[in-house]
Amino acid sequence: MALTPDEFYDHARAAADSELRLPLARMTGWEISPFEPEGLRVSPLRPPVLPEPPRHGEDPADCGMCKARDEGLWFTDHWRLARVAGVGVPLALMLYPRDHYDLAELPDELAAEMGVLTTHVVRQVQALPHVARAHVYRLGDGAAHLHLWFFARPAGQGQFLGSWLPVWDDLLPEYPAEVAEADAGAVADALVASYGGRRTANA
């Protein structure tokens, strides 16, 4: 059985200093880290707070992702794909079920579709010129409606390898929107050809 919240906090606190600051992560010493370790320090460890606050959209009636079920650049009856604006990487896309599900609630049939569809999205993003890799993320702490992130890592930028990419994305200037929009459209068109679906919400 996992540690209780208080047990976990005590376990972590034992490794912290008198200000409840843990040592710097090993990741900050990686060559691809966006930060130099000198001068960095970890925020003080905070005790657990229970119950946790509700996520956005716990009630489907208040879920913004449900309200936007017809917004995006590619659709099936079950899924929609949208471009995330204002990012620093060449392209960020988000895949949503059109109906209200979180990952653990997803019916097996839709889970199987998601696996195949995720592979197709990755293939098409990686087929874009000057994109080296498509990263896929699912976090789930901010919203109760399932959403998968796809980040296009720019070719040749070795510093952006791996798990630091979302942090680099937050540091980079906004990527030219017209270029990202054109590439998103190319991915959507390629998805229609490789997987099916359509460019409009309604058949």
Image (tube, rainbow, N blue to C red):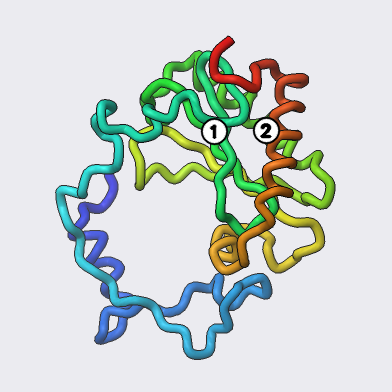
Going by the numbered disc 1, the residue's amino acid type is Leu
Q: Name the image quarter holding the N terminus.
A: top left
Place of residue 94 in the rendered image (x, y in percent of width and height, measured from the top left) = 55, 38
Query: For the image shown, how many numbered marks are present on the structure?
Result: 2
Instruction: Identify the residue at the far top of this view.
Output: 203
- Pointer 1 local density, CA inside 10 Å: few below 14, some 14–19, many at least 20: many
Depicted 185 relative to depicted 31: above or below = above
Q: Considering only order in the chain, which callout, 1 or 2, is on the residue closer to the N terminus?
A: 1
2 and 1 marks in contact (CB < 8 Å): yes
> Nearest the camera: 69 or 151?
69
Q: Residue at point 39% right, 78% down?
A: 42
Left or right: where does residue 87 sit relative to residue 124? left
* Residue where numbered disc 2 is placed: 121
Q: Which residue is mark 1?
A: 95
- Of residues 126 and 105, the one nearer the viewer is 126
Residue 137: x, y in percent? 54, 45
Give the quadrant of residue 172: bottom right
Mark 2 crowdedness (10 Å alpha carbons): few <14, some 14-19, many ≥20: many
Instruction: Please state if 2 lies on the left or on the right of 189 as rendered.
Output: left
Q: Residue lying farthest bottom?
A: 39
Give the residue drawn at x 58%, y 55%: 87
The single residue placed furthest to the front in the displayed view is: 178
The answer to whether residue 28 is above or below residue 197 is below
- Farthest right residue in view: 129
> The residue tagged with tag 2: helix, strand or loop?
helix
Q: Residue at x 35, y 35 (%)?
A: 64
Distance from Cα at disc 2 to Cα at disc 1: 9 Å
The amino acid type, in three-letter code, at marker 2 is Val
Question: 19 or 60: which is nearer to us?
Answer: 60
Instruction: Tell me which residue sits at (59%, 26%) in the image.
Output: 115
